Amino acid sequence: MVNKYIVKKIDDITVSRRIMILGAILPLAVFFFPLWNVTLEAPQYPIPLGINIHINDFSDMNPHDIKNINLLNHYIGMKYIPDAIPEFKIFPYGIILTSILGVFIGLKMNHNWFLKWFFLMTILSLAGIIDFYLWEHDYGHNLDSKAILRFTDTDGKPMVFQPPLIGSKEILNFKAHSYPRLGTFFLGLGTILSLLSFFISKKNLKTIN
Amino acid sequence: MKNLKFISTIILLGFLALNCELKNSKESNSGALSSNAADKVYIPPGKYDSFYAFISGGFSGQLSVYGLPSGRLFKIIPVFSVDAEKGYGFNEETKPLLNTSFGQIPWGDSHHPDISQTNGELDGRWVYINENNTPRIAKVDLSLFETTEIIEIPNTAGNHSSSYVTENTEYVIAGTRFSIPVPQKDMPIEDYKGNFKGVLSFLKINPEDGQMNLSFQIMMPGFNYDKAHPGRGASHGWFFYTTYNTEEANSLLEVNASQNDKDFIAAVNWKKAEEYIKKGKFKTVATNYAHNIYNESEHTAKTNWVKEVRILDPLECPGLVYFLPTPKSPHGCDVDPSGEYIVGSGKLSADVTVHSFSKMIKAIEEKNFSGEAYGIPILNFDAVHAGSVKQAGLGPLHTEFDDNGNAYTSFFISSELVKWKLGTWEVIDRKPTFYSVGHLMIPGGNSRKPFGKYALAMNKITKDRYLPTGPEVTQSAQLYDITGEKMDLLLDFPTVGEPHYAAGIPADLIKSKSKKLFKLEENNHKYAVHSNEDVKVTREGNSVHIYMTTIRSHFSPDNIEGIKVGDKVYFHITNLEQDYDVPHGVAMIGANTSELLIMPGQTETFIWEPKQVGVWPFYCTDFCSALHQEMQGYIRVSPKNSDIKLSWSLDGE
């Protein structure tokens, strides 16, 4: 009777390890799905312009969108969206290494490491979001002093064109929408699963002990 | 005496027509009001019409694109006439499209558009349209709505019984209205009879790209071949042509070509013709004609000169052609959706004559002939005649069909559309037109599958229908709802030039295939540049080639020096935009040509020959952006003997 009980608990430990491993693998989905999307809507763009941000690339939502966003943005002195940024080289390694680490933890290490991996992923994700925010801020504020169109706000200060980090915002004649996409959801879900596996594992061990 | 009788008949007809017009204009006032026509043609802002109508421009030489039921004009596609607005026939890329054996011709007379078909149904890939004066057929590509091919038809004069497609777009055909000496020679006109010939042409279509190739011609007697339509269903493999002037008169035809009680519908078995071609029964005859093809990726047209043509002689090809006697100078020659009935409208008659295809085949098998003309058997009228629509109106011209077994015939003299029943030949309804209708069009009416919702009447005379605009007034089209037992006049709208035939098609069949732009990476124009880094100016003797780009909102280069008086300056301009509806235009002061209007991803060229020293501006002619007005540049022109070297500005430098 007691033996059976313990065996069941050991099974549960295996379940928590499985969840941890799943959590560690899910972030790899960012190689297949975009992390973020910024879409620009205006009446004369019945098909809106949009850019998808991937872990290693920017891509057009519809053909030629980035080229056309750049063309519009040059009027107000915004920099061109570059073909590549240094992050595209670093971030994929970050994802692969943390995934391998997470799988290893899931197989070999105790539940306290599950929590450590959770914090590692949370910090890295926050760093990514801050990096995105800083780039957006620079993109929206650091305008060419010879810009063709220079607008001022109601206080007389030069108008800035930073897209929202998350949400929707009116920018001149456009409405900008900035929202996470599937890649980010998988990344977040993986991170949350690692926390979940930590609690399941902890609870079960307590019961066994 | 005969002439006197004829003239008095004409006076009487004119009188009747006038009466009809007076009567009709009274009917019209109440007609439209009572039926709530406005609701049926109103398309709210931002919404789409349900049909495209491609309406020939007649003496404008073009093809206009309208929406139905609204009657709104979307585009005039330049085909046979130059169009300065679009640079058509002015830029170096499209000039070759207008080449003919008579030289480059800036004008044409466009008549009968017909949409390509698959299995007897409209497939919406290409529109073919004929040019009457300098015999040609053009292909308009419906992914671009642009003319992409024009082929000249040799041995032909007045290319009128053209340009209809067979039910799998195997062929588009052409036929001569005026018989002429073939080959052309210096001879007395009065020796017409028996010596002039009428040639019918069959152009094979490449199913991949719609390209035409003149496969063979049939040397017919010297009649006038007026209109034509292909067989379909059981009669697929046959083509039918109306003839007039079987009298073979060469002068004062309005009288002299109207003497025979019956002219003919010529039935041509083109499948048999293919067999004879295979057997080598043709003569290869020397000729010279232009075949002009526009290459989409090179954005450039090129002329190929063709030097010979294969000709079949019906005398040596038994079973190739039969004549069906048809009363009084038939004009329209129309085949119903089943392919059984061939409608011949004797334009000087009050009746519409209908022949039966199955009876025709039987008569041919039984050799039920009433005679022959130049060796071609004439079938016994009673043996092929299916029935006649009696006293239907005056001056029947053309017939279209709906999908419920009804036919609709236009009557020029009595200015009306008449709806009648196939098989019973009874008149169901008649409605006035304003005035003097020529062709009519039901979308898909020339196919196995008509879309019997609307009929469009195209009128030759408008008189008082619109605000007056001096002696020259517009021609018009009128839209009728034909879904009910009775036809209902919904709308009239002005047309471009004189509309002859038109072709209609449900919008859903083509609108999604319409291209938004040309892909820059697929631009293989000889002088294209794909980015601003590649712009340059080169000199070869007196010729200067400027490889220029446009993108919102500047030209690159925009300052050029080192051009000299007497140079021939080629502006090769590539529009680097890759966004829908962002063309750029360009015009240069003193250039003896039109502007260019360059679509995204396209390259076009114009020539400027500077005659005066100075600094001369050029600018964008299409309002492309908020900075359009700044889109401009200068060219410095130095004296002929100047040694100033070529130099140009690069982006912002």
Image (cartoon, coloured by chain):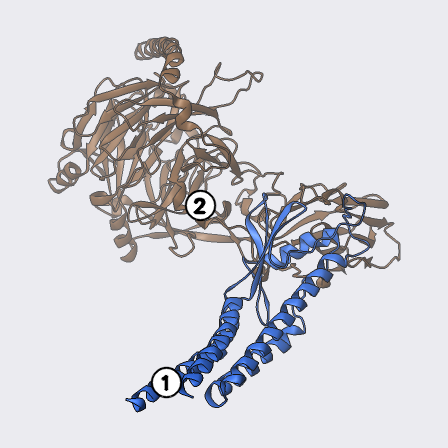
Chain colours: A blue, B brown
> Can residue B470 be seen at all in this image of the molecule?
yes
Give me the chain letter of mark 1: A
Amino acid type, label 1: Lys
> Disc 1 and disc 2: Cα gap in Å?
64 Å
Residue A179 x/y as whole percent: 56, 59
Q: Indicate the quadrant containing the C terminus of chain B: top left, top right, bottom left or bottom right.
A: bottom right
Percent across and percent down for residue A86 are 67, 74
Q: Residues within 10 Å of mark 1 (few under 14, many from 20)?
A: some
Q: Viewer-proximal residue, B124 or B627? A: B627
Q: Identify the amino acid type marked 2.
A: Lys
Nearer the observer: mark 1 or 2; the answer is 1
Secondary structure at badge 1 equals helix
Location of mark 1 (residue): A9
Residue at figure coordinates x 54%, y 42% from the top left? B102
Identify the residue shown where x is 38% and y is 82%. Answer: A12
Residue to which mark 2 is pinned: B511
* Res B415 → quadrant: top left
